Amino acid sequence: MHGQSTDTAFVSLERNLLGLQIGILEGNLYYEKAIRKNMSVRGELGTYVIYTVLGRNNAVGVDPRLEAIFYPGIFIAPRFYYNLDKRFKEGKNISNNSANFFSLRVGYIPPKRLFEVTEFLDITDTHRLLVQQTWGLKRNLGRLFDVELELGLGYSTEFFRGETFGELFIAYHLRFGFKKVIYK
């Protein structure tokens, strides 16, 4: 912290971040807007995979198969960065919102498939609403790149032919990205 004060009164998130991230079976374009010293709202537009293990009956019993279908999706998420001051006091890099956070992601995935990896041809497309409560961390990899990890629980509601189906799921995201502060 050469020449840097330890006063955290001026520690704050970047006001406007634009980035592109690629993760395990997903990719997105995001915009993150600071709304308070340690709180932001993030919007994402990208591709997301929905995968399950399905069983097909055969002469011996149930034969499990993995299904992975890629869909477009849109998410919005308020983020609360809870350790900016601590990281700053310890002399750690907090640029580009490099800190730990809690988030509540809300998203919509329409029934339009981009592509799929499945042996089943009778899988029905549905509209999906998702809510995910996650804990995450974001760290810089140099000036232009970052890595982000999110873990948590989610609830998905699917709408199909007038019926509604819901399920709990484990939410996890590991993404590597390119980011840019777009105006201060």
Image (tube, rainbow, N blue to C red):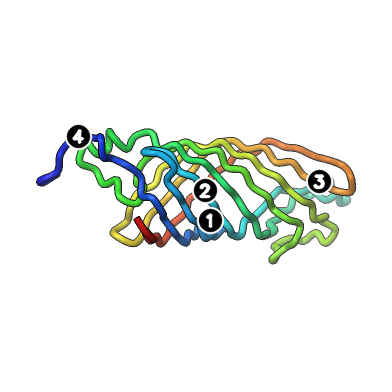
Q: Tell which of 67 and 178 is nearer to you.
A: 178
Find the distance from the CA under tag 1 to the CA under tag 4. Answer: 39 Å
Q: Residue at x 15, y 39 (%)?
A: 5
Q: Residue at x 62, y 38 (%)?
A: 154
Kind of element beneath mark 1:
loop
Count all numbered tags in the image, as a single digit: 4
Q: Quadrant of the N terminus?
A: top left
Residue at label 2? 173
Q: Percent x, y for residue 12? A: 32, 42
Q: Image quarter for residue 155?
A: top right
- Name the residue beneath numbered marker 1: 24
Image coordinates for residue 73, horizontal then vertical, percent: 64, 56
Circle 3 residue: 159
* Of labels 3 and 1, the one closer to you: 3
Q: Identify the mark nearer the N-term, 3 or 2.
A: 3
Q: Which residue is mark 4?
A: 7
Q: Secondary structure at mark 3?
A: strand
Alpha-carbon span between mark 4 and mark 2: 33 Å
Label 2 close to label 1 by CB (< 8 Å): yes
Amino acid at dot 3: Phe
Give me the C-alpha separation between circle 4 and circle 3: 51 Å
- Image quadrant holding the C terminus, namely bottom left
Question: Can you say whether 88 is above or below 51 in the image?
Answer: above
Q: Which of marks 2 and 4 precedes in the sequence? A: 4
